[in-house]
Structure formats: structure tokens, C-alpha cells
Image (cartoon, rainbow, N blue to C red):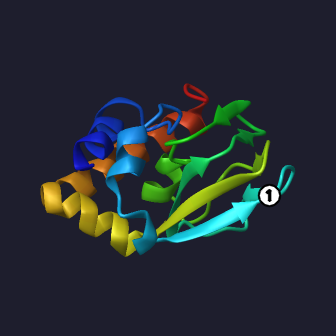
Amino acid sequence: MFSALRRFVCRSMGGHELLVDLVNGLTLGAFVHQDYQSGEVVVSREITTDRLFIVVQGRLYDLRCRRIYSRGCLLQPADFFAADQYQDLIVAKSDCRVLVMTRDDVRNLLSAQSAMTWFFARSLSIERLAARASGSHP
């Protein structure tokens, strides 16, 4: 479970890679699930980054990046780790279920691997958001 999140931190920071083993490795009943209907807003600029969203089933669409998220995808992880609010509008493309993890839950999971993993994820995310702001990354 933790190795998948670590791979995400090291490789993508974009959240578009399927991390099915992360979702499968979690005790899903321990976290809140939210169901959304097709067309419903899941993430918007009004939502603070005090929780991370992971797609459990269904498909979601990021209107800014024109990216599809499906099972195992983390929604806008760079925003979660480095911003106060999410930057994109993400809607359910089909009926879907999303796992919601609080910031403390994510920090505890990452810290269980290594005390530096949380800080490393935040540093990478800050760099990604800075690149996005300068126009050098989507």
C-alpha cells in the first residue's frame, strides 16, 4: 500500500497514474466514501485541501487539464500537498465513488513509511505548482 503512494510521489505528482494497489491495500471501511452522480462536481476551487480524494469506482473529468481519472487515481495531489484550496474543477463523468482521506490520515500513512516522505511529497508538490504557475507544466 505505501509503496504505491511512494511511487506516486516519486514519479507523477499529477495523480493521473492508476494506483490500484494503493486503493486495494487500504482498509476501505476505515475511511469516508462519497458517491457522486454523473455531472456532479467533486472538486472545485471552493474546496480546501484538508482532504485527499481517491477514485474507488467510476470516472471523473478535470475540466482544466482535460484529464480523465479512474479507479485508483488521486485527484489533484499536488494541490492537496502544497495549496490551501484545489485549483481545478473536477466533475463525475459517470456515477462514481470516491474515498476521502483527511490530511492527518495521509500524513500518518506516509510517515509510517519514513518520516521524510510527507515532507518530500510537499516539496515536490510545491515545485509542481510553481511550474504550473510559470506556465511550464499543465
- Tell me the element at label 1: strand
Pick out the residue farthest to the top.
136
Q: Position of residue 60 (x, y in %)?
A: 71, 43
Above or below, 118 relative to 132: below
Mark 1 = which residue? 41
Using the image as rendered, state which of residue 87 and residue 10 is in the foreground: 10
Pick out the residue farthest to the left.
114
Q: Residue at x 44, y 70 (%)?
A: 29
Q: Residue at x 79, y 42 (%)?
A: 93
Q: Residue at x 26, y 57 (%)?
A: 118
Using the image as rendered, state which of residue 77 and residue 54 is in the foreground: 54
Q: Position of residue 33 (x, y in %)?
A: 58, 67
Neighbourhood count class around disc 1 (C-alpha, 10 Å): few under 14, some 14–19, many 20 upward = some
Image quadrant assignment for residue 26: bottom left
Above or below, 133 relative to 99: above
Could you tell me the amino acid type at mark 1? Val
Q: Position of residue 41 (x, y in %)?
A: 80, 57
Image quadrant assignment for residue 109: bottom left
Q: Position of residue 66 (x, y in %)?
A: 74, 30
Using the image as rendered, state which of residue 51 and residue 125 is in the foreground: 51
Q: Residue at x 30, y 66 (%)?
A: 107
